[in-house]
Amino acid sequence: MAYFPMFVDLKDELCIVIGGGMVACRKIRVLLEFEAEVVVVAPEFCECVMVLKDKITLINKFYEATDIKDAFLVIAATDDIQLNTRISRECKGLRIPVNVVDKKEECSFIFPAYVKKGAITVGITSSGKSPVISKRIKSRIKEVIPDYMEELVEILGDIRDEVQFLFEQEAERKLVYKQLVELGCLKQGKLTKTDIQDVIKRVKENQEI
């Protein structure tokens, strides 16, 4: 079975991590990279977690079911297998997405390997069957995405409203973006306002013929 790739906006969403060890720390760092609001519940926290204390909320206690009631998603990352199973069961009962570390069958979602460059995110998964292969693919993808793509994506994002306004047909918008991407790659992301207006003008002139 293959997992469906779904990209989710975590910005300011409440993500609760149960556990305060190194495994939990790795998950916390991923969540922070995507601007989640992270709350960590554990009776003790490792140094790695404590380093992040200004970016997260630490609740120094043993887990209780009420800890997850408002969660957008939950990570069960304790060293207690039975507790992780209980957390998974309680999350699923509340229809809260849950990830249980190293226990794919108890997860409702998994963390993919990923490459992130600004707004560009590429997720890779073997559906939990071979993380080593996922990591190998990740390293290859890193090699083929040039750094300037991050800047180019921001430029194209900034002109979306203008292009939507100027072109009613989706095919014409796609042509504008295609030409801008080709030109942007040639110029390694350094598109100027003149470049953009020239492409828009060229497409509009062809539209009017």
Image (cartoon, rainbow, N blue to C red):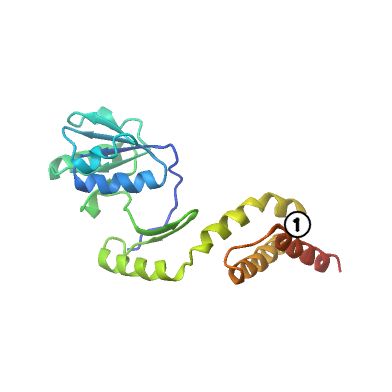
Say which amino acid is labelled 1: Phe
Q: Is residue 85 above or below residue 205?
A: above
For residue 5, which quarter of the picture?
bottom left
Given residues 189 and 134, the one toward you in this image is 189
Q: Is residue 69 visible?
A: yes
Q: Position of residue 94 (x, y in %)?
A: 32, 35
Quarter containing the N terminus: bottom left
Left or right side of 15 for 86 = left
Residue extending furthest toward the right: 209
Quadrant of res 175? bottom right
The x and y percentages for residue 118 are 48, 54
Locate residue 153 relative to residue 174 in the image: left or right: left
> How many labels sit on residues?
1
Nearer to me, 128 or 22: 22
At x 29% / y 69%, what residue is drawn?
133
Residue 141: image quadrant is: bottom left
Q: Give the left or right position of residue 117, taking residue 47 as reference.
A: right
Quadrant containing the C terminus is bottom right
Dot 1 falls on a residue whose secondary structure is loop
Q: Tell me which residue sits at (40%, 66%) in the image.
A: 142
Q: What percent of the width, then of the height, locates residue 86?
A: 19, 39
Which percent across, then down, holds residue 65?
A: 24, 30
Visible residue check, residue 130:
no
Image: 157 above or below 71: below
Q: Residues within 10 Å of mark 1 (few under 14, many from 20)?
A: some
- Considering only vertical position in the picture, is 202 above or below 53? below
Query: Going 76% across and 64% down the picture, which residue do you hit?
Result: 198
Q: Give the labeled residue for mark 1.
A: 167
